[in-house]
Amino acid sequence: MARKILVTGAFGLAGSDLVPALQKKFGKNNVYALGNKTIPSDFDGNLVTGDVRDKSSLERIIKTHKITDVYHLAGLLSVGGEKDPELAWDVNINGLRNVLELSRIYKFKIFWPSSIAAFGPTTPKVKTPQHTSIEPTTIYGITKLTGELLLQYYFKRWGVDGRSLRYPGLIGYKAPPGDGTTEYSVHIFYGLLKENRYSAFLKKDARLPMMYIDDAIRGTIELMEAPASKISVRTSYNFSAINFTPEELADEIKKLYPTFKCAFDPDPIKQAIADSWPESIDDSVARKDWGWKHEFTLPKMTNVMIVGLKKKLGK
Ligand code: SER
């Protein structure tokens, strides 16, 4: 059966890199990008528009294009969620429920991202294990925990093949940085190239798990392509690469741009969110089950971010 892939949230932080990767692997004609508000005018591929909360329009897309795989990325992030918790619940949960319900009928495979935000203050902060105390305090984290349990429920009850990763902070240059707590690590590169300075909205020692986007996209596709027999976790896999503090990232940039100035001016809401999340993640189950392995270190990520963003900004 020909693979036909739908990506929701196609133009967000992960989607902007996932769609071209899927187009390359499966052919441009076999990938459908679902966007809602922010659709770049130069997008090259199959475009479908709609809102994931509207089940009948999603159903129409899935039926018309005989979709076999859905990467359901549409959702609000942590800071955006705190600005409008009702909207975060509506989009993140009702969108996912629509996808899960439609998968019962049309039998497509699902990827859905969870996050380190599913963890909370009672979770061990260092090398957080796969199975642990999980009591998120942000609405975003609550939607992620709920989503993980729904995914597992639909798998056990209905055989829906949903797969998931607890994404750390993702760093990429293709999409403009959005409303995430970890996204100081993207904004900092814009500050560097535009003004040679940046003021971080987290404390200088706020250590968080992070990953360069190419690693995240490769891991995501590898998980989806793994045989079902290798998938032992049906909530969401711990998924990790590097971790660093804002100060460590600034110091890494200074190795290449010694005159770069970075200040640290924590925003209380964002800092409180960061404080509730782990510093590092134990992802040995993903590594054992389906062979996950990251490639990008902090210096390598810093280098490719600068090269890529320079080109994007025409610097
Ligand atoms: N990057 C996300 C955020 O900061 C975490 O999943 O909201």
Image (tube, rainbow, N blue to C red):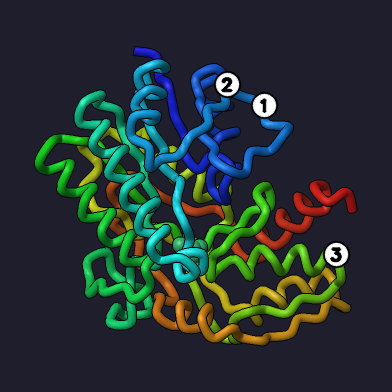
Q: Residue at x 54, y 37 (%)?
A: 35
Q: Amino acid at mark 1?
A: Asp
In whole angstroms, how far apart are the C-alphas of marks 2 and 3? Answer: 34 Å
Label of residue 194 in the image = 3
Q: Amino acid at mark 2?
A: Lys
Residue at the disc numbered 1 = 44
Q: Residue at x 13, y 36 (%)?
A: 158
Relative height, residue 31 to residue 77 (above, below): above
Question: Which residue occupies the foreground of this view, 190 or 259?
Answer: 190
Q: Amino acid at mark 3?
A: Lys
Q: Position of residue 278 (x, y in %)?
A: 40, 76
Asked if labels 2 and 1 touch by Cβ distance under 8 angstroms, the answer is yes
Q: Is mark 1 within 8 Å of ligand 1?
A: no
Q: Quadrant of residue 273?
A: bottom left
Q: Position of residue 196 (x, y in %)?
A: 85, 72
Question: Which residue occupies the foreground of this view, 40 or 51?
Answer: 51
Q: Residue at x 54, y 86 (%)?
A: 268
From the viewer's perspective, is 129 left or right of 202? Answer: left
Earlier residue among tags 3 and 1: 1
Relative height, residue 200 to residue 74 (above, below): below
Residue at the disc numbered 2 = 28
Q: Secondary structure at mark 2?
A: helix
In whole angstroms, how far apart are the C-alphas of marks 3 and 1? Answer: 28 Å
Q: Is mark 3 within 8 Å of ligand 1?
A: no
Relative height, residue 108 to residue 92 (above, below): above
